Amino acid sequence: MALHIARVEIENFRNFGILLIDPFPATAVIVGENNVGKSNLLFALRLILDPDLSDSVRRLRAEDLFDGSGGFGQAVTVRIAVELADFADDPRACATLYDCYLCDDPPRARLEYRFEPRQAIADIDDVTVGDEEPVELTAADYDWRLLGGPSDSAKPVRVEPRRYIGMKVLPALRDASDELTRRRSPLRDLLDRITPNPEVLKGAAADVNAAMDLLLADKTIGDLQRAIRGQTTDMVGPALQVSPTLGIAPTAPEQLLRQIRLFTDADRRRGLNDTSVGTANVLYLALLLEAVRQRRISNEHITTILGVEEPEAHLHVQVQRRLFGYLLRNEPALMLTSHSPHIAAVAPLRSLVLLRATSTGGVATTTAGAGLSDQQQADLERYLDATRAELLFARLALLVEGDAERYIIPALARAADFDLDEYGISVISVQGTDFAPFRMLLGNNGLDIPHLVLTDGDRTIDPYPATSDGLLRGLRLLDTDTARTALESFPEHPRRDGHRPLPSELDHTARQELTRENVYVGDTTLEVDLARLLPGPFQHAADDLLGTRAAADQQTCIEKVSAGDDDADVRKEFLRRIEDVGKGRFAQRLAGHLAAADLSGLRDVLDAGHPTGYLFQALDQASRLTRERPLLDHHGQNEADDHAEPTS
């Protein structure tokens, strides 16, 4: 592994009050919503390592200070620190960073940018004198410096590290064609690095001159040149010594090189202004990557840490994946920001850095402490395809078993006037019942994304209450004393050993504990539990999708299920007809009817002890967490209650 950033600390900078990312991945994919600080994080690192960043920019302005810091007048200190690792095999890096060592076996170095009041002012205790008003500091009273070594004994560095350990950030591009035609275009930088054969340049200049002479032989072009000269002379007379001349390019050999332009086709017919925004962005990125490569092979730097902001801009999905794969393979120290689920989906889990905004400033989480095994990590990486990677951007994730829930749960929420998208809630199918890796990934030691688990009870044989596979599955997700006690109390092999029923008090205790831990378990299966509560939409969907006779037979099953007069055979017949259509297709059609359903009579099922109401219990918790009100809190009813006559 090449030299890379291994730890990041930021204090009082822009939207970061206190930010710690430890460990910081060598290849970091920084994801998060808009305006959470992805670009600010890269800019903070540039203050330490970017050789192209002017010192004047390192003198911060008021808007660069964290809002909660109090501003210049409060003697605020801005700290940005990085720790560098894995450079033991590079003698130049060891020599450059020697004054900044934290340890030497293996070597690890620390660099810190600090922006604070000048020492003469900082030495005044709390910037006050007796009972006098605090001295009001201004930006002019501050300065910055670069320190090295442990935080409690850091000293100014003697060798400027950024001259040897550079950082290059490729900005988020929206229209690169304009950037490519500027004087500071990366193409200009690359051309300035090369030294063509002087004789070749002279010959090319002569050919350009001859080509222009040939064009001027055309009467129309010659007349245009004479007209421009005459107009200029008429305007200012001979006092201004200028002779306007048409040409293709300067004929001086040293100037000719700077006139080289980039075309998008082999015939040099299509310029950058004639191509798509996405293609221009790719070309711009290619030039910048080549400039970084040239720096490396010329030994200008020991290494160049590359930051790329939103490389997905204006690129379709396949190109996004291809580009990201290339960067992963070719950049040993890479930081990439993105809000594209297509890129996040193919990023290694160990590389993810998730930024989110909080009331105290931006925070970051990684998967380093999630405790995932290699197999679990590999399974999750295969799972996170472009559709499901949205869980990384969710404010709240609802983890469900399959695709049917992905159609049905948003429809139930709409029926309660609860728009899940509006509140950043994603329904994520785990395609089975193995919720454990997802809980680890999203848990407090992982990415720390709030989430709920919704799973079937899978009680298919015994009458309620009976041992439920769903309850066992849910309890095994918990690491609490109550859950462990409940598991020990469950009958061993209940179905194999005579289908022993589960005591009702144990069922209730288990469900209460699961609800406290945001795990919601049904009674039997999704369709059966929901049909008990909302039989009407099921019958409408059956009428839509089944033949007349099958729909009538299904109505009989629905009536028995909704009345609680069902057994295993009835449930099997009910589910078989749904499976004949296809659970996914049936759920799609059912969702349309559920969205218009009247939920006002379902308040009692929000009780955690009600086994068939688990979907509504989960949605109620999601509503409380995001909207800060119950799911079935109808404003009209509340207003009517408010205006009702008081009772005696």
Image (cartoon, rainbow, N blue to C red):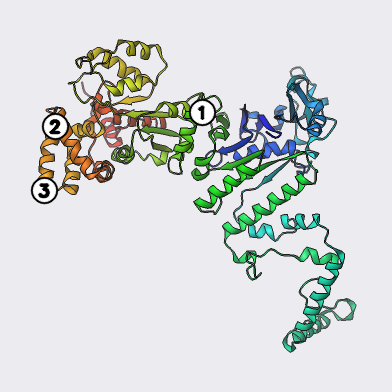
Residue 13 point in image, percent of width and height: 66, 33
Does any portion of residue 587 appear in the rendered image?
A: yes
Q: CA separation, marks 1 and 2?
A: 43 Å
**Quarter of the image where one finds residue 492:** top left
In depth, the one of 88 and 556 nearer the eye is 88
Indicate the secondary structure of the residue bearing disc 2.
helix
Q: Which of the image's four quarters has the C terminus?
A: top left
Amino acid, disc 1: Asp
Residue 200 appears left or right of 113? right
Residue 202 point in image, percent of width and height: 86, 70
Residue matched to label 2: 570
Q: CA separation, marks 3 and 1?
A: 52 Å
**Quarter of the image where one finds residue 582:** top left
In depth, the one of 606 and 585 nearer the eye is 585
Disc 1 crowd, CA 10 A, few/some/many (<14, 14-19, 20+): few
Indicate the secondary structure of the residue bearing disc 3.
helix
Indicate the secondary structure of the residue bearing disc 1.
helix
Q: Earlier in the sequence, mark 3 or mark 1?
A: 1
Pointers 3 and 1 in contact (C-beta within 8 Å): no
Q: Residue at x 61, y 52 (%)?
A: 173
Q: CA separation, marks 3 and 2?
A: 19 Å
- What number is the disc on residue 548? 3
Residue matched to label 1: 374
Amino acid, disc 3: Thr
**Quarter of the image where one finds residue 212:** bottom right
Q: Residue at x 66, y 65 (%)?
A: 263
